[in-house]
Image (cartoon, rainbow, N blue to C red):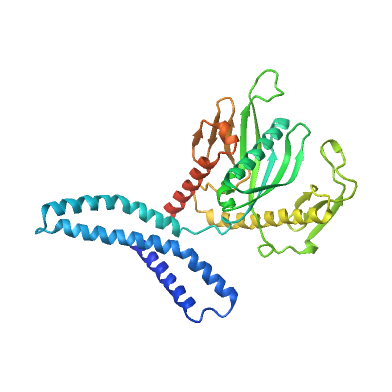
Amino acid sequence: MSALNEKLDRVARRYDEIAALMASEGPKDAQSFAKLSKEYSDLGPVVEAIQELRAAERESADLAQLVADPAGDAEMKALAEEERSTLQQKLPELERKVQLMLLPKDEADERNAILEVRAGTGGEEAALFAANLFRMYARYAALKGWKFEPMEINETGLGGYKEAIATISGRNVFARLKFESGVHRVQRVPETEASGRIHTSAATVAVLPEAEEVDVQIDEKDLRIDVFRSSGPGGQSVNTTDSAVRITHIPTGLVVQQQDEKSQHKNKAKALKVLRARLYDMERSRKDAERASARKSQVGSGDRSERIRTYNFPQGRCTDHRINLTLYKLDRVMEGELDEIVDALIAHDQAERLAEIQ
């Protein structure tokens, strides 16, 4: 507890320092002032939680003295013991609250996200499942009050999606969706299956934090930009101009294609947005891999090849393999009711990170 106390003291001192700085002449430039204001604002709730914990600790110590006083009134001592017992139960909860607030924050948590869903093994059934997943996330976004904007949908012609990309914007989008990256497996009887056999197929989900231009500098000379005529399912022409855009990032080999808009300029802007997010995600993954080399497990590894969840339709079961969570309400999950899974994944990640610092 002494190491935690030292940390709490440092946080409280820093909060007071910033308050004094801002109350005096303040930082010389607007950028420094904005940075200090944000730090002060971020530390405010933490300091409040620290004060609540310390007040409870002081009260517990005072009650302990009252109980131990040999000259004390027996009835008062009994009341004090009861109060102290209640406080002792509350203290670990307050301590955990403070520790969670002190965990290093993922600076991308508050960002919007780019969702990419791709059909994996399983042919047309995998494409139909990819379309189901894409709609599931659209419904989840609607339930959370987020904005869900499809950017690129590559349909199979039978209602399935080979690939679908959307931007999701709102409060804490990436924080709540970042553990969705990985392989999602489905077990069900395809509509096209006459014999009623259960098939297993898969789709891959990637959730990338949206990147700003300041996060990722893209040099024009590193890009190869090709324009071509947009085409819909079955080769039907969407329009008659060369408005579709394919951008290749030469240093990494990343390729992004956009053809949803009729304007070449808009398609290029969308493609650059996706490219920037992928490059930013690559850099984050590299740093995460360095930090995680000593970790035994990592719920948020974002490994695209890791099978993370199974959706079993005959049994109405959804299982997340990383935390051994099984819910028997698959129909509601597919309707976008993901909070129970998301909350469990976040809690598991927090518990793992807390274990590391204790």
* Residue at the image point whose x is 52% and y is 48% from the top: 298
Query: Where does the C terminus fall, quadrant-wise?
Result: bottom left
Whether residue 1 is visible to the viewer of this picture, yes or no, is: no
- Give percent across and percent down for residue 52: 35, 60
On screen, residue 59 versus residue 94, left or right, reads left
Viewer-closest of 332 and 273: 332
- Give percent across and percent down for residue 101: 44, 58
- Give percent across and percent down for residue 87: 28, 53
* Residue at the image point whose x is 50% and y is 40% from the top: 340
On screen, residue 321 versus residue 9, left or right, reads right
* Residue at the image point whose x is 36% and y is 51% from the top: 93
Viewer-closest of 115 and 126: 115
Whether residue 219 is visible to the viewer of this picture, yes or no, is: yes
On screen, residue 116 versus residue 242, left or right, reads left
* Residue at the image point whose x is 68% and y is 37% from the top: 130
On screen, residue 230 versus residue 12, left or right, reads right
Look at the picture and state if 345 lies above or below 275. Answer: above
Query: Where does the N terminus fall, quadrant-wise?
Result: bottom left
Look at the picture and state if 135 lies above or below 217. Answer: above
Q: Quadrant of residue 230?
A: top right
Q: Work out which residue is located at the far top of the displayed protein and give it.
A: 195
